[in-house]
Image (cartoon, rainbow, N blue to C red):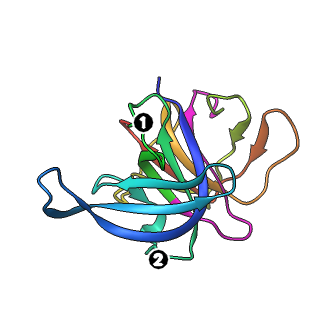
């Protein structure tokens, strides 16, 4: 099972990625971010990377990106990660990307979901997800949670990833 780690930082640069033949392919981007803990980090953004609400990214934006910690990564500096999802950081917006079980508890056992009629549950392409989001990888956007373990939240948005 994949484990997704978040990395948070401020966008410093966005460039098309160069292919191995030194040609600009134009289909993938390299986003450089400045982080508090790792310094500079490069994020590989492919056409398959989900960007929450399709929010345009630009230098100066604070973002959180999620990458598969078990995926191979080149041993270079600055570190470079291929990201699965990106969310712009905003006041009051919290997020989690994890596998959620049949009780809608994340893999770490730290967050439990209590969707309401106001919770938007959709595929990454924006189409409504029919049925329960349980037993899937989910990108969860929420604003408040209880202080219990696991914390309970009524998310505003759940994006269901059928294959992550």
In the rendered image, the vertical position of residue 90 relative to residue 152, given as above or below: below
- For marks 2 and 1, give the one nearer the viewer: 1
Splitting the image into 4 quarters, where does residue 99 fall?
top right
- Residue 31's x, y, as percent? 42, 62
| Element class at badge 1 | loop
| Element class at badge 2 | loop
In the rendered image, the vertical position of residue 34 relative to residue 134, given as above or below: below
Q: Residue 58 has which mark?
A: 2
The answer to whether any part of residue 145 appears in the image is yes
Most extreme residue toward the top is: 1
Q: Residue 75 has which mark?
A: 1
In the rendered image, the vertical position of residue 84 relative to residue 9, given as above or below: above
Q: Nearer the viewer, residue 23 or 68?
A: 23
Q: Residues within 10 Å of mark 1 (few under 14, many from 20)?
A: few
The residue under the point 69% across, 44% down is 114
Tag count in the figure?
A: 2
Q: Residues within 10 Å of mark 2 (few under 14, many from 20)?
A: few
The residue under the point 46% across, 62% down is 32
Tell me the distance, in whole angstroms, between the alpha carbons under discs 2 and 1.
27 Å
């Amino acid at each position: 099972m994949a484990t997704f780690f978040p990395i948070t930082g401020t966008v410093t640069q966005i460039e098309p990625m160069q292919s191995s033949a030194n040609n600009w392919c134009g289909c993938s981007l390299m986003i450089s971010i400045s982080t508090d803990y790792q310094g500079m980090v490069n994020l590989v953004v492919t056409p398959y990377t989900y960007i929450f609400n399709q929010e345009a990214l630009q230098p100066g934006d604070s973002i959180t990106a999620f990458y598969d910690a078990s995926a191979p990564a080149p041993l270079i500096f600055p570190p470079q990660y291929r990201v699965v999802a990106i969310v712009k950081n905003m006041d009051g917006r919290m997020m989690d990307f994890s596998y959620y079980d049949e009780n809608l508890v994340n893999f770490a056992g730290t967050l439990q979901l209590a969707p309401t009629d106001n919770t938007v549950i959709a595929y990454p392409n924006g189409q409504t997800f029919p049925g329960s989001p349980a037993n899937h990888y989910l990108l969860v956007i929420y604003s408040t949670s209880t202080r219990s373990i696991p914390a309970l939240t009524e998310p505003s948005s759940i994006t269901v990833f059928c294959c992550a």
